[in-house]
């Protein structure tokens, strides 16, 4: 099952990638299991996505909680707390 | 969302145009300051999440229309490179009486600052840095929870 990952602002710079197709591990997938998979990459991913760090996740452009289920083709964006205005 | 500057007078005139029921227009303009957290700011860059930004601003405007008896709302937010003195954001609301437009305008700004996916990166003499979210902005938005 493949999803589209988008990283924005400081996280895009830290991860050195703005967009990628990502294959989820087999089985029921949620934002939480996705984050576990990303942390396994280590480095900036493990650091920035650590449970004590502040970041937000939007699925198909709506901010969701980490128990939100994922399905094939979802657009999942991970970004820092917003600072506009 | 736009890169170019905006003309506040023209935007307000367009918002009121042809509606004699409008008795009040409240507006807010956000500008780039030359200081932040004690450092001088030379340049600012505003990034956003195209697609989600439009949806969030639409949701905020719809929420304002649900809460107050207002006629029209306008939200303009600039993206890209900005400098001190530049206008960043403009919100305007029309209503029959001032109370509704004042409140709705403040509500829209408080929600924009905590919900709309914009991020500021600023250039300081010590190098570039991403602006951190403020706890005071969360508190401002929380005031509107019923």
Image (cartoon, coloured by chain):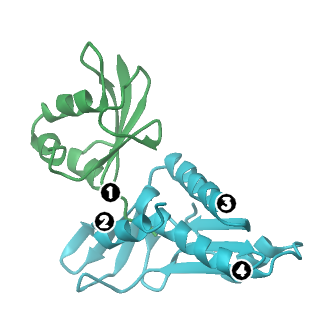
Local packing at callout 4 (Cα closer than 10 Å; few below 14, some 14-19, many 20+) is many
Instruction: Classify mark 3: helix, strand or loop.
Output: helix
**Taking B20 as reference, is A72 above or below it?**
above
Read off the residue under disc 1.
A81
Foreground mark, 3 or 1? 3
Whether label 3 touches label 1, CB < 8 Å: no
Chain (cyan): B
Read off the residue under disc 4.
B25
Q: Residue furthest front?
A: B146
Read off the residue under disc 3.
B65
**Taking B56 as reference, is A84 above or below it?**
below
Foreground mark, 3 or 4? 3
Whether callout 2 and callout 4 share a subunit is answered yes
| Circle nearer the N terminus (2, 3) | 3
Whether callout 1 and callout 2 share a subunit is answered no
Whether label 1 touches label 2, CB < 8 Å: yes
| Circle nearer the N terminus (3, 4) | 4
Image quarter for residue B43?
A: bottom left
Residue at image point 12% right, 46% down = A47
């Amino acid at each position: 099952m493949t999803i589209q990952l988008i990283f924005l602002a400081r996280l895009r710079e830290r991860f050195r990638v703005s967009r990628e197709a990502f294959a989820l591990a087999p089985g029921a997938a949620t934002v939480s299991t996705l984050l576990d998979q990303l942390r396994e990459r280590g480095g900036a991913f493990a650091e920035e996505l650590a449970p004590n760090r502040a970041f937000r996740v939007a699925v198909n452009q709506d901010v969701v909680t980490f128990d939100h289920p994922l399905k094939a083709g979802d657009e999942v964006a991970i970004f820092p707390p917003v600072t506009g205005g | 969302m736009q890169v170019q500057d905006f003309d506040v007078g023209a935007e307000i005139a367009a918002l009121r145009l042809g509606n004699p029921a409008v008795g009040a227009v409240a507006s807010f303009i956000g500008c780039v300051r030359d200081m932040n957290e004690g450092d001088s700011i030379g340049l600012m860059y505003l990034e956003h999440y195209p697609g989600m930004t439009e949806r969030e601003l639409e949701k905020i405007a719809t929420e304002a229309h649900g809460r107050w008896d207002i006629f029209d709302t306008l939200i303009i937010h600039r993206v890209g490179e900005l400098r001190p003195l530049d206008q960043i954001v403009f919100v305007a609301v029309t209503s029959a009486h001032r109370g509704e437009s004042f409140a709705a305008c403040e509500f829209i700004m408080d929600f924009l600052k905590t919900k709309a996916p914009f991020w500021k990166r600023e250039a300081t003499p010590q190098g570039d840095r991403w602006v951190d979210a403020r706890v005071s902005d969360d508190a401002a938005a929380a005031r509107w929870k019923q």
